[in-house]
Amino acid sequence: MAKRLAAAEKEVLVEVVRFTQKNGLKGSDGGWKDFLARNDKKFGDSVSDPRKRSRDVLLAFLQTFSKDFQKYFGKLVKRQKERSTVQQYMNDFPDKVSPEQGWKVLRIGEVSSLVSSSAMLAIDCEMVLCDDGMEAVVRVCVVDNNLEVKLDILVNPSKAITDYRTHITGVSKKDLEGVTSSLVDVQKSLKRILAKGKILIGQSLYRDLCALKMDYCQVIDTAYIFKYANLPTTASASLNSLCKSVLGYSVREGEPHNCLKDAEAAMNLVLAKLKHGFNDPIKVAASSVSESDALKLLAHRIPVHLPCQELCKIFSGNPSIDDKIDSRIRGEFYSTSISFNEIDELEMAFEALDGQMTKDSGGRLQKYVLMKRDNGDVVSFYVRKMVYGPQPNQFEFPKKRPQPIEDAEPKKEQVDGDQQKKKRKSKKHVNSAQVSVVE
């Protein structure tokens, strides 16, 4: 990531520095102006416009941040480069982009410095699973700040559907009979209604934009505009939980998603944020958890060539594997659940499972497992519990013990003992560097 940042063009570095200014980020020399005042003896912070500074100065400032921040900056650089590449390709080779497969990069219109709620639109999409392992849009709804419907359309994916997910999407095979609207038609409609700098709102909006094959920057994602008092830092709340906590009502209680209601809910969340602030962390309502889920482990990112029944041998106890995985295949991977009879049996199986402890994108603890098959192949996947307590991030990974206070005159027995400990510690360190493989 550091190399990517160092190789970035000046225009991209300008945008990254502006990002740090907008979010009040500070490196080891403080913020942008602090850095200039401290390191530029000639001009100080009198010339603070990043565009008027050299590339070397911009890069020097960004390199004062921690490695984690520089890693994030590298992702920003990559994103900007990808956007530029897509746009350049579409400009140079417009005839080589398939209408059904091509992404659309929507340009942002003129945006007023005083953005009002009338400049906002909320969107929600429902997706089905197709035979190529990819998701495809089948319904799109858009509402304005007055909750007036601007778009409500069913979409024909133009490829075979393996799972309609009717229990989630509310869309069945019968609903799509006779539907002729394509993804290109939806893209054209969205391009028209998003003109003049409209702000697009949605819950986990990146999933909708990815399914729509659209690149649009002027967005508000309701999953990230609130701070949570009872969730891990990296976690986000569901739309239903947010509505219960912020708006005082539930979007659904067990029934399938309603695309239109979900778009309205996202708009109402943003309007509530603008009106009431909600600057302090909120306590989101807990999602309902079934008793059966509490007795399951989730194995995910499993290579499709690995039969799910082979997973049984790596778990202690007497678990059963859900072998109905067709609806959970995502390209080259799939997921499945491992069920146990008692919670203690599940806890022991997860504790005994040999794997490296990590956290998923939601902050939940999981184990990265390497499994050796009978044919000698080694496959990897992740395993986590289906149900955690309210704050799984309270788990602390092992830390080094504090150094003991040395005596002025250590005894010979202590010296000999310390030397033996160092040898054992060195040997343990070598072993811990090797990744265990479950056979």
Image: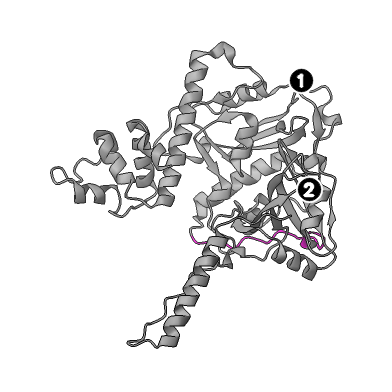
The residue under the point 35% across, 41% down is 18
Over which residues does the magenta segment extend?
Answer: 280-294
Looking at the rendering, in which quadrant would you find the C terminus?
bottom right
Q: Please give the residue where the numbered disc 2 appears in the rendered image.
A: 374
Q: Quadrant of residue 346?
A: bottom right
Between label 2 and label 1, give the one nearer the viewer: 2
The location of residue 58, given as percent across then percent down, is 29, 40
Q: Amino acid at mark 1?
A: Thr
Please identify the dominant SS of the magenta region.
loop
Tell which circle, 2 or 1, labels the residue nearer the N-terminal end: 1
- Residue 369 or 194: which is nearer the viewer? 369
The residue lying toward the viewer, choosing from 439 and 68, is: 439
Q: x, y percentage for residue 288? A: 74, 60
Amino acid type indicated by mark 2: Asp
Q: Name the outermost residue toward the left.
A: 42
Q: How many marks?
A: 2
* For residue 310, side relative to residue 406 (left or right): right
